Image (cartoon, rainbow, N blue to C red):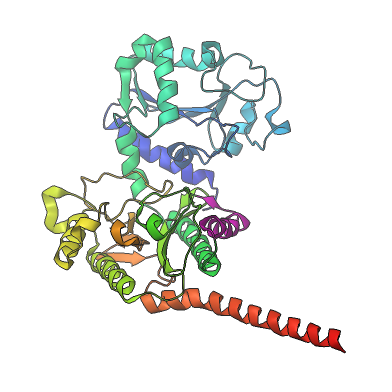
Amino acid sequence: MRNNNAVYAQRRKKLVQALRGVHSNGTVLLFADFETDRVAFRQESSFYYLTGLNEPGVALTIDLASGSTTLHVPNCVQTRAKWVASKVLLEEKNAAKVGVDHISVLGDALPGYQIHPFSGQGDYAKLLEAIKNDLRANKKIFAFDGSAPSGYMQQRLILSRFCEWLPELRGAIVDLSPQLATMRCLKDNDEIEAIQESISITQLGQEAAAQAIKPGMFEAEVQASLEYVMLASGARPAFPSIVGSGINSTVLHYMENNREMERGDLVVVDIGAEFNFYCADLTRTYPVSGTFTPRQKEVYSIVLETQQYIADLAQPGYWLSNKDHADKSLNHLARAFLEKKGYGQYFPHGIGHYLGLDVHDVGDYSQPLQEGDVITIEPGIYIPQEKLGVRIEDNYWIVKGGAVCLSEDLPRRPHDVEQFIQRKLEEDEELEYDDIEDEDYEDGDDSN
């Protein structure tokens, strides 16, 4: 997706218009995530959606009346550019470069090059004073303050600390996550292109996995092969890669990836690349020996039939999951389909989820699908007593009258999957044969 400040400015304008319908006198208050020592920094998705900035520890305020935006930057004594790549400078003239109207310091000078989640009140002094002035003017403060137990965790942490420092703030907060979720659900063409790029890289990862799978290989070796492709493509795993063989194929979020694969196993490979902040999520199930057994093929075919049935139904006006509209709920329709096949009890999870800046992207499951939504369709059957698990997952773009599969190029029919695997197995056999011939030739040389 192009890094165009105008795109983010337009999104902020749209958000402001939506919030003015709730309360005309207010300020939007957004916090970026914080960097840690354990993982590469990745901006919180909604903050990135509105700013395009991958800068930790900053805050953004938007005045609803004027639409003016101010980026509040930690007052670091040490120049961040000496430590990390950063394009945010504490200078007003830098505002246009990063797409905002003004740049201001958060508060008092910090001794190092970064701010932390539990930095003191003084480190936010100037922003706190601005918020205090807004409260004196009876403004509402629009922030991420949802009641869900997960989501916007670091932002809610800082917001709760602001409420400790400014007790009067709590009563003025209005949660803006519903409005932003509505915006983020409907993907524009640039976002679809970004998701498609992530899917293309993930498909390369699946191909690498298929080439690595064979008896005697460890799940971790398959993981290393597919994640190498992601990293070499400029992407990163969007979530911990799942490579589950044998009994592990029946564990939905299996992540140990430490088992040696055996002939006769199935292996579930559930992976996704994140490229330019947008995610993919694709699952394939492979026979380790290169060929499905009759029983494996029977179960695999039912899962594939289920996916195709749901994909043919998916369109605007249907729900991902809504028990009050079971006749148009993809999850309930999939469950009913598998019940008729005798496998309902072996399908423990939902049929899919929203996809975008997050793997499990924001979206209101109580609302029907709309044009512009991107979802996964991922039926599965898991039979622990048979050590047999099958999941097939693809990514779909909801369009007028239907759904377009964005991952159509990745093989999924049983015969095509077998060919996908066998290509590598045959290459390995040819290499082994060539090695034997070379050894025989060398032995012949030694005898002369």
State the residue in front, 380 or 93: 380
State the residue in front, 18 or 78: 78
313 vs 69: above or below: below
Name which quarter of the figure residue 333 lies in: bottom left
83 vs 223: above or below: above
- Main SS of the magenta segment? helix
x then y, percent, for residue 81: 70, 33
64 vs 281: above or below: above
Q: How many marks?
A: 0
Name which quarter of the figure residue 415 lies in: bottom left
x then y, percent, for residue 278: 47, 51
x then y, percent, for residue 242: 45, 53
Q: Is residue 62 visible?
A: no
User: Does 359 lie within the magenta span?
Assistant: no
User: Does 221 lie within the magenta span?
Assistant: yes
Residue 333 appears left or right of 21: left
Which range of residues does the magenta coloring cover? 218-237
Residue found at the far front of this picture: 447
Q: Is residue 193 visible?
A: yes
Residue found at the far right of this picture: 448
378 vs 55: above or below: below
State the residue in front, 213 or 145: 213
Residue at 46% of width from left, 36% of height from top?
47
x then y, percent, for residue 11: 42, 42
Q: Quadrant of the C terminus?
A: bottom right
Residue found at the far bottom of this picture: 448
Residue at 31% of width from left, 59% of height from top?
377
